[in-house]
Amino acid sequence: MKHHFETEAIRTQTERSQYLEHSTPLYLTSSYVFEDAEDMRASFADQKVRNIYSRYSNPNTSEFIDKICKMEGAESGYAFASGMSAVFSTLAALLNAGDHILSCRSVFGSTQTMFKNILPKWNISTSYFKIDEIESIERLIQPNTKIIYAESPTNPAVDILDLEALGSIAKKHNLILIIDNCFATPYLQQPIQFGADLVIHSATKLIDGQGRVLGGITVGNAKLIKQVYLFSRNTGPALSPFNAWVLSKSLETLAVRLDRHCDNALKVAVFLESHNKVNLVKYPFLKSHPQHQLAKKQMKAGGSVVAFEVKGGIDAGRQFLNSIKLLSLSANLGDTRTIVTHPASTTHAKLTEEERLQTGITGGLVRISVGLEHPEDIINDLNQALAF
Ligand SMILES: Cc1ncc(COP(=O)(O)O)c(C=O)c1O
C-alpha cells in the first residue's frame, strides 16, 4: 500500500537483523561474506541483488536511497559523498568527450566552475540560458547536446524556473533533463512529475538539516541510474554508511522541519519587505516575487532561503553582516541555525562580475538560510543589524 510522504519517510527501513532493533542500526562494514564460491561468482556476475562491498552498496546507504526514491517518485538512485560528487559523477557517467550541456546560468558556484574549468578538459562544452529565457533554449541546442541542467529555486538569487517547460523541451529533443532540487527538497517539489529524468541533491543541506554531515544523491530513470552506478562503483565517490545513517534518520523529520523553515522564512521575508533599508526581497511565496505564480504551481511552500539587497551596495552589505549578533555567518544552508551569507564575496567569488550579474548576484545581495530558532529572535537580530 502506498503511504503518505511523512509515513514513507519514517517507515521505509532496511530489513531488521536477528536483534529485532526498532531503529535501523549502523552497518559499519566495508565488505560482506558469501555462502560459497558459487554464491560469490553469481554475486559478482550481477545475477544476485545483494551487498558485495560498501563502495557498491550498504544497508544504510540503500535505506537512504530508497527513501529519497519514494519521496521523489524515482525508479532508482545512487548516493554520494557530497552534492558535488553527485553532480560530477552523474555528468561524467552520462557524457562522452565532445558532448554539450545546456545549463541555466544561475546554478551553484562549484557547478559553474565545473562547467567552465573542469569538463572542458574532456572537450565537454556548456552553453547557458537565463532563467527568463526558457522559450529560447531550443535555439541553443546543438547536434552534440545531451543534457539540460538547472536548479529551481536557484542559489543564491532564489529565482524559479519553469520545470514543466524544461521537461517538454527535453522530451521533444530527446535530451536528459537534470534538476538540482537542493533548495526545495522532495517535500516541496518533485521535478520528475514535471519531466525531469534525474534529480540531484546536496543532502548536506536541508536533508541533513542540522549542519553535521556531507552527502549527495542522484535519483531518477533506472536506465540512466544504472550508468551512474556502474561509473561510481568503479570510481569510488560513494557515501559513507555513517553519513547515510545520519541522513536517513534526518529524513524522518524532513516534513515537520520544512513546514517550520518555510513559516519562519515567509515571516522573515515579510519583515524585510517592510524595512526601509532594504531594496529588494526575493522569496518564492511573496506575491512580489517575479515568478510567484509559477512557484505556487510547482512548489508546496517557498523554502528556507530568502535573498535581499541592502540599500547602499557592497559596503552596506558588509556592514550589515558585521552587525549580526545571534545568526551565523557561515557557508552552509538548510541548517537549524539561521545563516547569513554574502555570495559576491564568498560562494560565487570565483566568477567574474559579469557572470555574477547574469546569475542575479549584485554586490549588496545577502542570502539568508532561515533556520528553526523562534522567528521573533531571527527578526530581532536582522532588525538590529539593519540599524547600522
Ligand atoms: C544548489 C546546490 N547544489 C550543490 C551543492 C553542492 O553540495 P555539497 O556542498 O554537498 O557538495 C550546493 C552546496 O551549497 C548547492 O547549494
Image (tube, grey):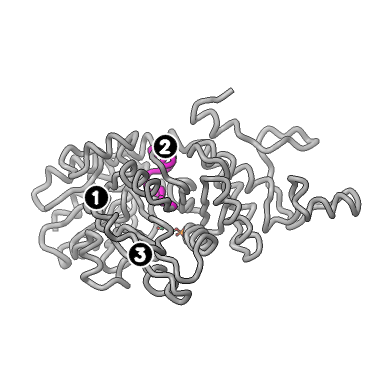
Residue count near mark 2 (Cα–Cα under 10 Å), binned few <14, some 14–19, many ≥20: some
Residue pictured at 35% horizontal, 42% vertical: 373
Residue 247 visible in the snapshot: yes
Magenta-drawn segment: 176-193
Residue topped by disc 1:
135
Question: Left or right of 173: which side holds 237?
Answer: right
| First-in-chain label (2 vs 1) | 1
- Marks 1 and 3, how far apart in space? 24 Å
Nearest to viewer (mark 2 / mark 1): 1
Nearest to viewer (mark 1 / mark 3): 1
Residue count near mark 1 (Cα–Cα under 10 Å), binned few <14, some 14–19, many ≥20: few
* Kind of residue sitting beneath label 1: Glu
Taking the view exactly as shown, the residue that stands out farthest to the right is 36
- Marks 2 and 1, how far apart in space? 20 Å
Camera-side residue of 310 and 86: 86
Camera-side residue of 132 and 309: 132
- Marks 2 and 3, how far apart in space? 27 Å
Question: Left or right of 260: which side holds 291?
Answer: left
| First-in-chain label (1 vs 3) | 3
Q: Position of residue 100 (x, y in %)?
A: 40, 65
Q: Is residue 56 above or below residue 15?
A: below
Residue topped by disc 2:
193
* Kind of residue sitting beneath label 3: Gly
Contact? badges 1 and 3 (CB < 8 Å): no
Indicate yes or no whether the magenta region holds residue 177.
yes
Contact? badges 2 and 1 (CB < 8 Å): no
What SS does tag 2 mark?
helix
Q: Quadrant of the N terminus?
A: top right
Nearest to viewer (mark 2 / mark 3): 2
Residue topped by disc 3:
109
Q: Quadrant of the C terminus?
A: bottom left
